[in-house]
Image (cartoon, rainbow, N blue to C red):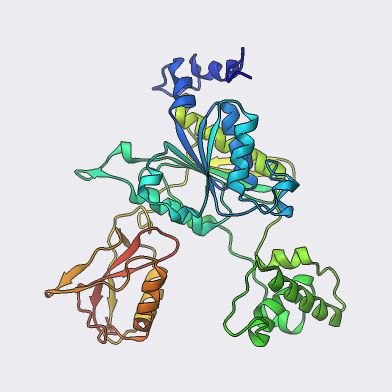
Amino acid sequence: MEDDWSGRWNHVKKFLERSGPFAHPDFEPSPETLLFMRNVCKILVIGAGGLGCELLKDLALMGFRNLDVIDLDTIDLSNLNRQFLFRVKDIGRPKAEVAAEFINTRIPGCNVIPHYAKIQDYDESFYREFHIIVCGLDSIVARRWINGMLIGMLKYENEELDQSSVIPMVDGGTEGFKGNTRVILPGITACIECTLDLYPPQINFPLCTIAHTPRLPEHCIEFVRVLLWPKEKPFGDGVAIDGDDPHHLKWIFEKSNERANQYNITGVSYRLTQGVVKRIIPAVASTNAVIAAACATEVFKIATSCYLPLSNYMNFNDTEGIYTYAFEAEKKENCMACSSIPQTFAFSETDKLKDIIDYLIESPAYQMKSPGITTSVNGKNKTLYIQTVKSIEEKTRENLKKTLKELELVDGQELYVADPTTPNSLTFRLNLGSKME
């Protein structure tokens, strides 16, 4: 079958080859726009799960041919009810590879390149290859990381943002029958960190309830996870729970059943155990389809400039009927990612490094610099933390117990802290003072 049959792009051409009342003020109708979409524009889809499968299908059918998809997971049986690019024969294979094969086979002319890896495995040069990045993630940490990467790639000339260094990011997320879509222009609009407070707090059960008066199957599972696991150490001293390890889950499931029977509680199942341990919220295929369609529409608008993009946050809820609401999230002046406002901290020489780092990480603002910077104070170079490298962490772990005086840090010294939510190190300038100050 030929790549372009008669009438294949008629509907898309109606948007790109004629103007309209909602068109972008700078939009000029032209057949070249479709050629740019198909032959030039490169899009990276992060995640090949419920949202990612829908995104790949929507973007490919729209006419985007140069697509890359990155995902670190393999296909599981539980994925098949909503991740429609996968089949039973694909179980155990990388999601990115199977999704790419499916799209390339079913949609003529499409070239999806898979990456079976973590987003942290690639550097700035990789992400600069793309015109737009679309996220179908289920992790806040991953969102914060790619947000930090795109902000770190921005270039400035005479304190003015170089617009050519801006790579737009379209982010989608779903939780059951709820979802959201947002458009982020790094350095221009609100970023992930600016809106971090909008994420709902994680549901936790009171310790007294799970220990003494359990009433729900979830209470029994939490009892085993929080209290029984560290006490019995079923897989050895210091072994943490791995939600993806079937042996771990089986042990927790069996112990949870035993506790549930003691209190005449029903409903403990392997699936529920996995959901509680991994904090899984049930996925709904229809919600994924709606949010992915909204994200793909925003990609289309950004790539073609035919219409104004979303400004900049849309909520979707179909728990009781269908409700959507769009609003403009504003940049935070002291955003810990996209703000350049310096923050001053006062510490004493007797303060321990671990306490300081815990305080700084929770601070609403910090200055970011590229990894590997070493500053000189009084002719002495000191760099405590540079990158999130395991070997560095192991070598410097003992420093966490020491005071600033023991580390020979002085007033004005810059402290570098590595955090898994950002590709760059966090930089703090110490302002040493007394406890009274």
Judge from the rendering whether residue 317 lies leftward or rightward of residue 137; answer left or right.
right
Task: Say which residue appears at 58% left-offset and 46% top-offset.
Answer: 96
Judge from the rendering whether residue 84 lies leftward or rightward of residue 427; answer left or right.
right
Task: Say which residue appears at 29% left-offset and 87% top-offset.
Answer: 350
Query: How far across and down, in percent of the image, does residue 59 sit?
Result: 57, 33
Which image quarter is the N terminus in? top right
Judge from the rendering whether residue 340 lies leftward or rightward of residue 99; answer left or right.
left
Is residue 319 at all visible to an observer of this figure? no
Total labels: the figure holds: 0
Q: Decide: is 52 above or below 370.
A: above
Tell me where residue 251 sits by quadrant: bottom right
Q: Decide: is 104 above or below 370.
A: above
Which image quarter is the C terminus in? bottom left
Query: How far across and down, in percent of the image, does residue 192 sit?
Result: 46, 52
Residue occupying the far left of the picture: 379
Residue occupying the far top of the picture: 6
Is residue 272 at all visible to an observer of this figure? yes
Along the viewing direction, whichever of 345 and 72 lies nearer the viewer: 72
Judge from the rendering whether residue 42 lies leftward or rightward of residue 230; answer left or right.
left
Query: How far across and down, in percent of the image, does residue 148 sit?
Result: 40, 54
Task: Say which residue appears at 49% left-offset and 14% top-offset.
Answer: 17
Query: How far across and down, in percent of the image, does residue 9 sit?
Result: 58, 18
